[in-house]
């Protein structure tokens, strides 16, 4: 199991002022826990329902991510946090989590050399009797 990811106090201090507040309804699960859970899912690549319980209910984590995505909260948050801090000298992207289709490695179902249906139909019929016929003809004088 992957280690749990928690936002640092410094990161939370930069994020928290830009989050939506005063939403109607029942009291929300702590935003810091939920955002840590969202980042955990995105970092580890697990399914939403496999989110560790320490972050809160997985449905809450998914719903918060989904609703904030639809409302543009993430876009505004990233823009404000990026504008508030210095631009890093270097950035690194790791795309090792990108899944390739199973045929990309030449496995079953891949672009292997398969005879076409026409070629298979035109070729000699394959049967167990064929080697015996050839052997019998070779023995005959």
Image (spheres, rainbow, N blue to C red):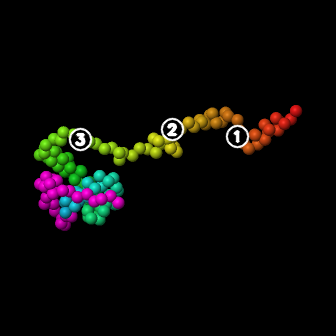
Residue pictured at 31% horizontal, 44% vertical:
94
Residue pictured at 11% horizontal, 46% vertical:
84
What residue occupies the far bottom of the structure in this picture?
Answer: 26
Image mark for residue 91: 3
Residue pictured at 52% horizontal, 45% vertical:
108
Asked whether 99 falls inside the magenta stretch, the response is: no
Q: Is residue 76 left or right of residue 4?
A: left
Residue pictured at 70% horizontal, 35% vertical:
124
- Cα gap from disc 1 to disc 2, whole angstroms: 24 Å
Task: Describe the element under mark 3 as helix, strand or loop.
Answer: loop
Task: Describe the element under mark 2 as helix, strand or loop.
Answer: loop
Q: Earlier in the sequence, mark 2 or mark 3?
A: 3
Q: Earlier in the sequence, mark 1 or mark 2?
A: 2
**CB of mark 2 within 8 Å of CB of mark 3?**
no
Q: Which residue is mark 1?
A: 126
139 or 62: nearer the viewer: 139
**Residue 88 at x, y = what percent?**
18, 41
Q: Which residues are magenta?
A: 1-29
At label 2, counting other C-alpha atoms closer than 10 Å, the crowd grade (few under 14, some 14-19, many 20 or more) is: few
Task: Describe the element under mark 1 as helix, strand or loop.
Answer: loop
Q: Is residue 86 left or right of residue 112?
A: left
What residue occupies the far right of the structure in this picture?
Answer: 141
Q: Is residue 54 left or right of residue 137?
A: left
Q: Earlier in the sequence, mark 1 or mark 3?
A: 3
At label 3, counting other C-alpha atoms closer than 10 Å, the crowd grade (few under 14, some 14-19, many 20 or more) is: few
73 or 111: nearer the viewer: 111
Asked whether 20 falls inside the magenta stretch, the response is: yes
Image mark for residue 111: 2
Q: Residue 20, relative to residue 123: is it above or below?
A: below
At label 1, counting other C-alpha atoms closer than 10 Å, the crowd grade (few under 14, some 14-19, many 20 or more) is: few
């Amino acid at each position: 199991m992957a280690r749990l990811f928690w936002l640092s106090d410094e990161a939370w201090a930069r994020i928290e002022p830009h989050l939506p507040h005063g939403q109607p309804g029942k009291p929300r699960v702590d935003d810091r826990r939920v955002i840590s859970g969202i980042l955990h899912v995105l970092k580890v690549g697990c399914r939403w329902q496999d989110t560790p319980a320490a972050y809160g209910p997985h449905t809450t984590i998914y719903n918060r991510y989904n609703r904030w995505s639809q409302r543009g909260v993430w876009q505004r948050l990233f823009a404000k946090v990026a504008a508030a801090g210095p631009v890093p000298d270097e950035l690194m992207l790791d795309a090792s989590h990108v899944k390739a289709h199973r045929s990309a490695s030449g496995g079953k179902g891949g672009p292997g050399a398969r005879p076409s249906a026409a070629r298979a139909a035109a070729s000699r019929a394959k049967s167990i009797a064929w080697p015996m016929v050839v052997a019998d003809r070779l023995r005959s004088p």
